[in-house]
Image (tube, grey):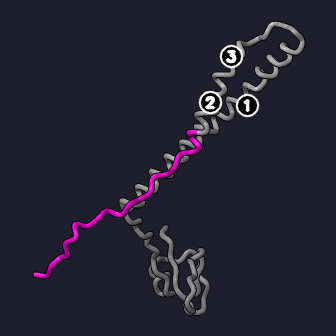
Amino acid sequence: MSKYYKTIAGGTVWYDGRITLDGMQIFNPSVAQLEAAGYVEYIEPVPAEPTERELFERQALAEREAHFAQARVLREELAQEDYKVIKCMEAYLTGVELPYDIGTLSAERNAKRVRINELEAYEMPVWVEPESDGEVAKDE
């Protein structure tokens, strides 16, 4: 069933399954009874088409979120690999052979840190109003 409402003293009252009509309470009234009690059908407004600027801003926010999401993934990867650094440190301190190639491990981790910094330095593009051609429309 559609939504119905009426305005009383500047406020909106929504139909909730019962109405008062001619001093009587009516449950599950017909459309004619709703209209007789002053209720009107609520018609959902059609959303306006987004402007070019709104589309631009949505795209810019999506790109920004993608950059930060990628940085979060890389940070998680670093955190999950911390144990490798600890194992290498323990092996080094105890004089045991290193379980991982520390040069490769360090290079990979530094590359991830550099990429995180690049992603977090992302600057959102700024909307620039299109310039008019300078001509003023003439009435003919």
Label 2: which secondary element = helix
Q: Earlier in the sequence, mark 2 or mark 1?
A: 1
Q: Is residue 3 left or right of residue 76?
A: left
Front tag of 3 and 2 = 3
Q: Which residues are magenta?
A: 118-140
Q: Which residue is mark 2?
A: 112
The mark found on residue 79 in the picture is 1
Q: Residue furthest top?
A: 97
Q: Which residue is mark 3?
A: 103
Task: Name above or below for residue 46 compared with residue 101.
Answer: below
Q: Earlier in the sequence, mark 3 or mark 1?
A: 1
Residue 66 position in % (x across, y down): 53, 42
Residue 90 position in % (x across, y down): 86, 17
Label 1: which secondary element = helix
Which residue is at the front of the view, 66 or 97?
97
Q: Going 68% across and 19% down the picture, which residue do you hit?
A: 105
Q: Quadrant of residue 116?
A: top right
Front tag of 3 and 1 = 3
Q: Is residue 131 magenta?
A: yes
Task: Name above or below for residue 79 compared with residue 122.
Answer: above
Q: Going 46% across and 80% down the picture, which residue do you hit?
A: 40
